Amino acid sequence: MPGGDGTGPAGKGPGIGRSNEGKERCRGRSAKASGGPGGMCICPQCGLEIPHTPGVPCTEVECGRCGNPMNRK
């Protein structure tokens, strides 16, 4: 931008800071890290592990041993 005051020519420019408008998937997280249907829920207090139920967040599941909310493993 001339003068650095934001009054440069109109146009697309190099596209720095723009989204890719849905052309590519985000590369920040793998399918495993983002959840998905499989996996396990684990209790942070006692360590009990149970299979994850698709559609039910682990944090909404109570541990069968100690009653604490589970976390996704």
Image (cartoon, rainbow, N blue to C red):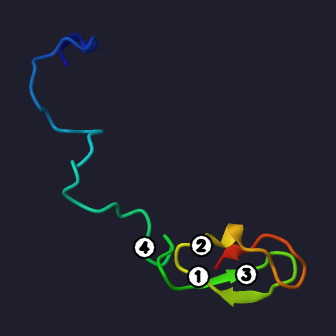
Q: Residue furthest right?
A: 66
| In-image side of 15 versus 45 (left or right) | left
Instruction: Calculate the distance from the C-alpha at mark 3 to the C-alpha at mark 1.
Output: 12 Å
Q: Amino acid at mark 4?
A: Ser
How packed mark 4 is, by other alpha carbons closer than 10 Å (few <14, some 14-19, many 20 or more), is few
Question: Which label was assigned to residue 30?
Answer: 4
| Marks 2 and 4, the one that precedes in the sequence | 4
Residue identifier under label 2:
56
Residue 17 at x, y percent in the picture? 30, 39
Q: Quadrant of the N terminus?
A: top left
How packed mark 3 is, by other alpha carbons closer than 10 Å (few <14, some 14-19, many 20 or more), is many
| Marks 4 and 1, the one that precedes in the sequence | 4
Q: From the viewer's perspective, is the residue at label 2 or at label 4 nearer?
A: 2
Q: Amino acid at mark 3?
A: Ile
Residue 11 at x, y percent in the picture? 9, 26
Residue identifier under label 3:
42
- Tell me if residue 34 comes above or below residue 48 in the rendering: above
Q: Amino acid at mark 1?
A: Thr
Q: From the viewer's perspective, is the residue at label 3 or at label 1 nearer?
A: 1
Residue 6 at x, y percent in the picture? 25, 14
Instruction: Calculate the distance from the C-alpha at mark 4 to the C-alpha at mark 1.
Output: 20 Å
> Residue 62 is drawn in which quadrant?
bottom right
| Marks 4 and 3, the one that precedes in the sequence | 4
Q: Residue at x 19, y 57 (%)?
A: 23
Which element is circle 4 on? loop
Residue 8 at x, y percent in the picture? 15, 16
Q: Are marks 2 and 4 in contact (CB under 8 Å)?
A: no
Q: Amino acid at mark 2?
A: Val
Q: Residue at x 70, y 72 (%)?
A: 71
Residue identifier under label 1:
53
Q: Quadrant of the C terminus?
A: bottom right
| 50 vs 32, nearest the viewer | 50
